[in-house]
Amino acid sequence: MVRTYVAENCVEQQIQEIIGRGKEEVGLIIGCHGNQKEQRDYVAFLATTPSQDDEDAESESEEEVDEKTKLKKEEKQDVELLDEKWIFNHCIQVSRTLPGGFEVIGVYVANLSESQTSAVKNVFVGLFKQVFKYSTIMLTENEKILISISSKTKKATFQSLDPKSPQSNFQLCELKYQHFVENWHLLRTVFRIHFLFPVSEELSCKSIRKQTQQCFKEWCKTVEDPVVLINDAIRADDEVLVEVPKDKAKQKARERQEIRVSLLKKLPYPDSLTAVGGQCRHRFVIKGDVSCLSYVRNKATVHEAKQAILGDIHRTMWARMELLGEEFEVSESDQEMQHNQSFNALEEINELPKRVFIQHPKCDMLLSDYVFSDESAPDVQERFKQVFGFEVAEEQIDFDIESFPEIELSKNEIIPPIVPASLTPNEAAKLLRNIGWGLLGAVGVGMASIFYLWGYFD
Amino acid sequence: MEAKPYRITQIQESTILLRLRCGFEVLFASNNGECRIEEGFERFVAAKLRHSPLAFKLQSEPVLFLNGHVVVNSLVNNTLFRAENGKEPRTVGDVLPKVAKKTGKTKSSSSMRVFDVETMEVQGQPSTESVTSPTLSSEGDLSVATLVKVPVDAIVALEKTDEASSVHAKLLQGLMDHMELIRFCMIKFKQAGKVVAVEPFHFRPLNNEYIVTTYYPTGMDETELETFRRSLHVCLELPTNRPLFRRGNMYRFNDTETRGGYLLNVHEGHSTVSPIGGQLALVQGLYSYHHYMQDRFDDNGWGCAYRSLQTVCSWFNLQGYTSKPIPNHRDIQQILVDVGDKQPKFVGSKQWIGSMEVSYVLNNYLGVESKIMFVSSGAELKEKARELAVHFENQGTPIMIGGGVLAHTILGVDFNSNTGDVRFLILDPHYTGAEDLEVILKKGWCGWKKTDFWDPMAYYNLCMPQRPSVI
């Protein structure tokens, strides 16, 4: 059966813009996989993967370019455009911003050269294989889409392929343009976390980032298959989420509703009473609330809604833990290089970044970003420009959904940093925040140390 | 306030019991071999019971007790249905499902209703006043961390007229009470500084109008717990010559008619009215019915005494005197060889045994003494009626009787001291059918027999097991 895709009108707009630009491009497709039975997926919008040379572009000078190096550069660009690792990294960045119910469902390519076109399938399969292996919290293992856009023919073709069976070929799909996001229901919940994780002796020898990753894995196990209350009512899994009485006009039936969700975790009588334990060096305690949001299609069942909101809960904690882990990693490695000794970046109390919601300018949905206590609107705007390529006005960012806890700053010793003269604190911090990029590109090691004192200087 | 190591729940016919069975995971740290139990509990209670909201749901019913209100939903024809008059339910009686009256014969259990309740942690709520984003703290020093699964089995007694909105608070209080009990038990029975696993038990001693709840450390031998049990007997002013608080004595809430696939107390299907105007003296407590062909073992024609012995063993097991399993034919034969009564080739044979052998096995396997009664003729049994009645009143154990070529179990006597009329309640091990209560009762495999049941030409030996005086 031919797969159908329902795409938002803004997707059509974006495709036209890409055709207009006429450049070689690669990017991600954000949408939602429909249920297995219907063989239908939904495309919400596209996100262009920024080019790798953007950062190096400034440092090049015109005189260095001559025919030979130009050709070489083009070849390099060829390969660089379809750089799996680079796109993978973009995928992580994008996935962190998406609300529950939405995920990266494919890749688009535009104006590829011949050599690139033949490499597409491998890159496509390789990329998603990497992602599935990395984390199924980012996205689900389904057939993914490939949109091929050509400015010459002014056309876009939609195909799909299951990355887990690479020996099969891309299948052509049908496409329909239609508004849908604005009608989808919105699920909201505030999820409370109080998790104790003893760090075994064995684990405490590994990096703090690895410890936090293991901690996150264990925490995930405590959030599985809860009982769900929809608008304070107990509902069965197979019921339709929002019942619409038949006498109301069809129009009204497709309006978005905000649904209040409660999640209850069963505490069953234990099957076995064997205690589990071991030596541990210290304990992690994660305490706090996370604000969660997800979207589901109108005819979704209670089960689908449950999966969507659970997906968002996992994803928001994953994003926060990863961001904190990255901070630790950078500061640890930096201190080691500076002072040639191991350094424990872990303080008594470490804030996870809080979630802020951003209204997508074209699509009626809320994206999210995570900010540490020393960040503000400009940082969010900068990040969104890089990850999505669009501008976000300050009014569209909601900073007050969550608040940081009131804690005293830890009295740990701060090692005085070395500030490189060439950078202003702003630039340094910015580069630091874009750690994802920073890890792949070249980041001056000295800049990382500024982070610790950022809270003190303003 | 001195900590009581048990809780009492008063019950009456009109009582509605909510039974909370749930489990928690509690983290304990220990330094230098000493487990910090108090600390572990305090942190747990603060995190999970005081600050984290809990909800309670009736098992398999869409009734949820949350802090402050009750949610009763069922989708009937696609419309939400809340109680009967469309308002939030007021009393417990409004909320709980009506239980259909059980038709057919009813056992003599109380008409107390028991509802199982699931405990749930409210992890996600639609909104709260403030959403404080999480922090990750690192704490602690080098120690041993043990994650212990703590089972809770709490019962809360309610009346139909209680306010439905008060149920949540009562259930939560019940949970907190039990955390106290568990904490007490863990501290008391700490072994070499390590924390022990504990399990909840409910008891209804002497079928009184209350239930006693306490916790025992898992796997600890009954003999080691004797002092603790004695203190319970004394506190509750209960006789100290019979076990009432052993694990085997635990109260079973659901009226089970079988245990391990065997039928329990089949005699209760008979009327307790004497057709001869006599007084009934019956076996006390519980036993399971053992007979030919059970356990897919064909002992037809030779195993009747073995089966009767199994019924007697089941009585001691069900009254908590022993936790040893009911021995099979081979086990019984092996015991007789071990005590020197039989030659080794006896094991695996189809040889009969009599009341003497039964008494040897009871002695060796269960530590139970027996009185042996001899009657030279079946007709004499009529004269022994009074003695048998006294046995059932004082000991209440089933009697194994062997004579002629048959063995049976006597479960009671019906004796009219004026007329001298006697009936005997007999459990027949010669039954070869399935565990079909109706057949067993109708066809008299368990039934009242007249004195002509016994063969006047045969002599009989009775093995009358004596209750050990233990707690």
Image (cartoon, rainbow, N blue to C red):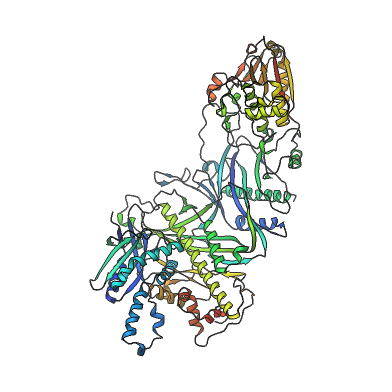
A221, B22: nearer the viewer: A221
Image coordinates of residue B26 in percent, x first then y, are 63, 54
Q: Quadrant of residue A123?
A: bottom left
Instruction: Say if A40 sits above or below A398 in the image.
Output: above
Compared across the picture, whether B381 is left or right of A244 comes to right
Farthest-out residue, front? B345
A261, B29: nearer the viewer: B29
Instruction: Say if B168 sits above or below A430 in the image.
Output: above
Image coordinates of residue B111 in percent, x first then y, are 58, 33
Regarding residue B26, the answer to whether it shows in the image is yes
Image coordinates of residue B101 in percent, x first then y, are 52, 32
Regarding residue B134, the answer to whether it shows in the image is no
Q: Quadrant of residue B393?
A: top right
Give the residue drawn at x 53%, y 56%: A221
A324, B308: nearer the viewer: B308
For the N terminus of chain A, the quadrant is bottom left
A302, A442: nearer the viewer: A442
Instruction: Say if B127 sits above or below A437 in the image.
Output: above
